Amino acid sequence: MAFEFSFAPEHEMFRRTLRGFLDEEIRPRIDDEFYDSEAFPWDLVTPMAEQGLFGVTVPPEYGGAGLGEIGYGILLEELAKVDTGLSTIVGAHTGICLAPIYLFGTEEQKERYLPPLCRGEDIGAFALTEPQAGSDAANIKTRAERDGDEYVLDGTKIYVSNGDVADTLMVSAVTDPALGARGGVTAFIVDSDWDGFEVSSKEDKMGIRRSTTAQIEFDGCRVPEENVLGNVGEGFIVALTALDGGRATLAAGSIGGATEALNRAVDYANAREQFGDPIAHHQDVQFKLAEMSTDITQARYATYHCLEYVEEYYEQIAAGEDVSKAFREKVSRRSAQVKIAASEMAAEVTEKACDIMGARGLAEGYGVEKGLRDSPIAEIYEGTNEIQRMIIGREVAQEGGYAW
Amino acid sequence: MNIAVAIKHVPADDDVRVSKKTGQPVVDLTEGRMNPLGRRALETGLRLSKQDPASEVTAVSLGPEEAEPTVREALAMGADRGVLVADPLLEESTGLATAKALASTVRSLGDIDVVIAGARTTDRFAGHVGPAMAALLGFSIATHARSAGIDGEDLLVEKQRRDGTATRLQVPTPCLVSVGPQSPDPRHATTWGVHAAFAQDALERWSIADLDVSPDELGPGAAATTQENVEPVAEKERETEIFDGEAEDTAESLQRRLNSRGLLR
C-alpha cells in the first residue's frame, strides 16, 4: 500500500455528486428540531435509495455500486454532516447486514438478498445485542434449535437499528449452548415477514432520532437451513468481521458530524460581534477553531487509512482467501482505534462548537444542540469504546508498541 | 434519434479573476466543473432520449486534459458515450474556432440528429458558439429552450420569454438546440452511474487529428472576435431598511417611505 493520502477520481466524483444531492434534496428537508423518533424517515430514505446510497460497497454484479469501503466512508462522512440519524440508517443496513451477506453468503443467498437491499427496496438490520448481553456479546441466549431442515429461533434482541422496518436481518443465535461463543453461535439471514418474528417496542432516544431502534422477539420463528450465513458455529466470526469494517466507517460518520459542528461554529464566529469585532478575530476562539480542525484532520487521515486496510481485508474474504491472523488482528485493532479516536474527537469538537456559540449552542435550530445529542452514540454502538480499549489494551500489554 | 451534447469544463468559481498583466480572465481549471447550462443541456438530451428507446446520447467536450472529470460526470449522469477531444490548441480556442472544432466533432460522430448545448458558458459568456456551430453544420436552430420533445422527424421546442409567455417552435432535424436556465433541473449522478463512468474504455479520447479541421483554424489567433479586456462593473448600491413595531404602524411607515420616493402612484 502506497503511503499516499489521496482519493481516486471515482471517489472524488462520488463525494462531489453526493454533496450536490444531499445539499439540494435532503438538507433542506432536515430541521434541527426534535424529530419524532418512532417515525422512520421514508420521505428521505426513498430518494436516497433511488440515488444508490444503500449498496455502495457491493459490486455491480449483485446490484451495488462497487465503490468499496472508501466510498462507503465518504458516504457516511457526508451523510453525517446532514444528519447522523440518516448515516446510522445506512450504516446499520450496509455495514452490518449487507456486508456479512456479501462476505459470507452462498451464491444463492447473495443473488436473492443483495439486489433488493442494494436498491434500498429492502432495508437491512443486524441483531446481536440482548438484554443480558451488551458488551458481553458472547453471553447471548437467543436459541436456534435444529428441527429437520429448519432452525427454530426463540429469544429477545434489543437495540436493533432499523429493526422495526427491516425486511432482512442478520441475526446471531446459539446453536450449541455447550460451546457458547467458541463454536456455538451461528449467524442467520432472517426475513421479517416470517411467523414468530415480532417487533415488540421502539426506543425513544435523545439523539439520532431519525434512526429507529427496536426490540425484537423471536417466538418459534422457523428459519430454513439454507439461511444459515457462513458455517454453523462460526456466527461470531461473521458478526465480528462485519463490526471490524462497521467501526471504521462509523468513525467516518463521526468525522462528518464533527466537521458540521466546526462549520456551524465558524459561521457563527464570523457573524457574531462582541467588543466591536467578530468573535472569530478573538484569539481564544481562534485557538478553539484551530484545535477542532487539527483534531478532525488527524482522525480523518487515520480513518481513511484504516478503511484502506478494511477494503483489502474484505477483498480477501470475498475472494475466499485465507486471511492471516496477523492481518485480521491488525484490521480489528485499527478499526477499534479509529472508532475511539473519531467518536471521542467528535464529542469534544461538538462541545467546543457549543462553547463558541454560547447560548445559541444549546438552542434548538442552530445545529450544535442536535450535534450534542447525536454525537455520544458513536461512543456506544458497534462495541462500546470501553470494550475497544480492552481489546487494544490487552494486545498492547502483550506486544508493546508494535509497528504499524 | 442520435443526440450530441456539448459540455464545457469551466472554473468552479463564478467570480472571474482578471490578470493585471494581460487584462484577460485567468482560467484556473484545477478546480473545475461542468458548465451549469451544459449540465441542463445534458438533462434535456437525456429526457429527449427517453422518448425514443433507440436514441444514443453522446457528451462531447473540447479542451485541456482537466476536462476529463466533466466528461466522466456526463457519463455518470447517463450519457451513453463520452468523448473528450483534448489538445492544447483547443484550450486556447475561443468563439468561432471552438464552434469549428465542435462542428467537426459532431460530423465525425456521424449521423447526429440533434445537438444540444448550453446557451452560454460561465467563463466566456459569449453565447455564440451554439449558433455558429449550427451555421457551420447547416442545422436548423432553436435558442434558449425551456424544453424539447420529439415530434416525428421534428423537435418541438418551447422557449419562455421574459414576459412569461411561451413560444413553441417546430424545428426540423438535424438541428441544434441551446438551452436556457428555465430548462429542467439536472439530475444527480447515482452511485451506479459514478461507477460505470470509470469503467475501462468508458471515456473516448480524441485529438484534433480525429477532426476534419485544420490546426490553422484553431487556437487563439483563429477567433473571429477577440476579447479586449474584462473589468468589473460597479453594481448599484442596495439599501435595506427595517421597520419595527406593530403591523399597522410598520405598514404605514412603509407606505409613507414609498410615497416620499414617488414609488406609489
Image (cartoon, grey):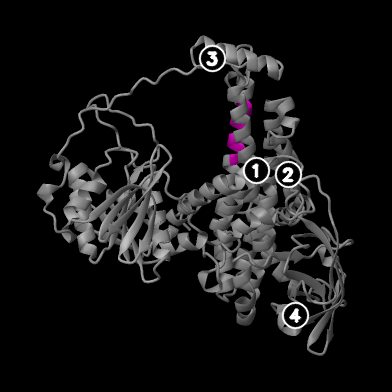
Residue under mark 2: which chain is it in?
Answer: A
Residue at coordinates 32% horizontally, 42% vertically from top-left? B120
User: On the rendered image, what quadrant is the N terminus of chain B found in?
Assistant: bottom left
Looking at the rendered structure, the kind of residue marked 1 is: Gly
Question: Both on one chain, marks 3 and 1?
Answer: no
Q: Check disc 2: other Cα within 10 Å, few if <14, some if 14-19, many if 20+.
A: many
Q: Which residue is mark 3?
A: B258
Give the residues drawn in magenta, as a range: A287-296
Q: Secondary structure at mark 3?
A: helix
Mark 2 near mark 1, Cβ–Cβ under 8 Å?
yes
Residue A374 image label: 2
Q: Work out whether residue A91 can be spotted.
A: yes
Which numbered disc flags the more N-terminal residue, 4 or 2?
A: 4
* Earlier residue among tags 2 and 1: 1
Q: Which residue is mark 1?
A: A257
Question: Are the numbered discs 1 and 4 placed on the same chain, yes or no?
Answer: yes
Q: Main secondary structure of the magenta part?
A: helix
Q: Identify residue type, mark 3.
A: Leu
Q: Nearer the viewer, mark 3 or mark 2?
A: 3
| Mark linked to residue A232 | 4
Query: Are the residues flagged by discs 4 and 3 from a single subunit?
Result: no
The answer to whether dots 2 and 1 both sit on one chain is yes
Amino acid at the residue labelled 4: Val
